[in-house]
C-alpha cells in the first residue's frame, strides 16, 4: 500500500510546483500566440513535461483558466466560514467581498493577463458568462449552507447577485488602464454605488 500523502510534504510541494509550471507556461503561450492557436503539445514542451502529464493536471486548456476561478471560490468559502454573516444583507457580507478583493489585488498582473487572453479568443467568447454562473452557484451554495430554509430562497438569490454586481463593478474600474486605486478600494466604492442605486429607485 502506498504511504498516505502528508499535507505540505515534499511530494505535495513537487506536485504543486509542477502544476504551477504548467499553468505559467500555458498562460505565457496563450498571451503570446492566442488561446485558440495554442496546443497541449506546445504547453508540454514549454513546461518540460509530457502531454500526458499536462492532461493529468489540466484535462483541457480551459481548465488552466479555471484554476483562478477555483481560487476565488475558495477565498469566498474561507472568508464566509471564518466569520459567518449575521444575516442575508450586503452589509453583512462586506468583509467577504473585501477578502476577495485582497486576493485579486495580490494577483493583479495575473488577473489582467487572464482578461487579455479571454478578450482575444473567439473560443472563449462565452467564458465570462460561464464564469459568472459558476461563481453564482458557489456563492449560493455557501449561503444555503448558512440559511437552509426554503423561505430564505429569494433573499439568498438577491444577495448572490448583489455580490456578483459588486465584483463586476469593482473589477471594471480596477482593470482600467487609468485606475490608480486598489481592488479593495474599488470594492468599497462599488458597494457604496450599489447601495445608492437601490436607495434612489422610485
Image (tube, rainbow, N blue to C red):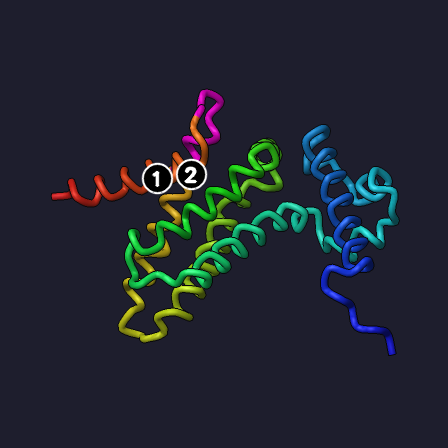
Rendered image: mark on residue 184: 2
Rendered image quadrant of residue 193: top left
Q: Position of residue 32 (x, y in %)?
A: 71, 28
Task: Give the residue at x 68% y 37%.
Answer: 35
Location of residue 130 in the rendering, given as x and y in whole percent from the top left corner: 51, 50
Judging depth in this view, the residue of 163 and 103 nearest the camera is 103
Picture quarter with the C terminus: top left
Q: Could you say whether the residue bearing mark 2 is in a helix, strand or loop?
A: helix
Going by the picture, which residue comes out furthest to the left?
Answer: 202
Above or below, comparing residue 118 to residue 81 in the picture:
above
Number of dots carrying numbers: 2
Along the horizontal axis of the image, is 18 left or right of 157?
Answer: right
The image quarter containing residue 116 is top right
Q: Residue at x 45, y 32 (%)?
A: 182
- For the N terminus, which image quadrant? bottom right
Q: Which residue is mark 1?
A: 188
Question: Which residue, as the protein is rendered here, is positioned at the far bottom?
Answer: 1
Q: Residue at x 74, y 34 (%)?
A: 29
User: Which secondary structure lies at badge 1?
Assistant: helix
Return the x and y of residue 123 as percentages of the image width and height: 62, 41
Contact, mark 1 vs mark 2 (Cβ under 8 Å) = yes
In this picture, residue 68 sits left or right of residue 24: left
Crowding at dot 1, Cα within 10 Å, few <14 / some 14-19 / many 20+, comes out as: some
| Viewer-proximal residue among 12 and 51 | 12
Q: How far separated are the C-alphas under marks 1 and 2?
A: 6 Å
Residue 17 lies, in percent from the top left, at: 77, 49
Q: Is residue 84 left or right of residue 39?
A: left
Q: Mark 2 Cα within 10 Å, few/some/many (few <14, many 20+)?
A: many
| Identity of the residue drawn at 43% across and 33% down | 172
Stretch in magenta: 170-180
Amino acid at each position: 500500500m502506498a504511504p498516505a500523502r502528508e499535507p505540505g510534504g515534499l511530494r505535495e510541494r513537487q506536485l504543486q510546483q509542477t502544476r504551477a509550471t504548467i499553468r505559467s507556461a500555458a498562460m505565457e503561450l496563450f498571451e503570446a500566440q492566442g488561446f485558440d492557436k495554442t496546443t497541449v503539445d506546445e504547453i508540454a514542451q514549454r513546461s518540460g513535461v509530457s502531454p500526458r502529464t499536462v492532461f493529468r493536471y489540466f484535462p483541457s486548456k480551459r481548465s488552466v483558466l479555471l484554476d483562478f476561478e477555483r481560487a476565488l471560490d475558495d477565498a469566498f468559502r474561507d472568508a464566509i466560514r471564518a466569520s459567518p454573516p449575521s444575516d442575508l444583507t450586503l452589509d453583512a457580507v462586506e468583509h467577504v467581498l473585501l477578502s476577495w478583493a485582497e486576493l485579486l489585488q495580490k494577483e493583479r498582473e495575473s488577473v489582467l493577463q487572464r482578461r487579455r487572453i479571454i478578450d482575444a479568443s473567439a473560443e472563449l467568447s462565452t467564458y465570462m458568462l460561464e464564469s459568472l454562473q459558476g461563481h453564482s452557484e458557489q456563492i449560493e451554495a455557501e449561503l444555503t449552507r448558512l440559511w437552509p430554509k426554503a423561505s430564505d430562497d429569494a433573499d439568498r438569490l438577491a444577495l448572490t447577485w448583489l455580490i456578483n454586481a459588486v465584483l463586476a463593478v469593482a473589477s471594471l474600474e480596477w482593470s482600467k488602464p487609468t485606475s490608480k486605486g486598489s481592488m479593495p478600494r474599488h470594492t468599497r466604492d462599488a458597494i457604496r454605488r450599489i447601495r445608492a442605486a437601490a436607495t434612489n429607485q422610485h
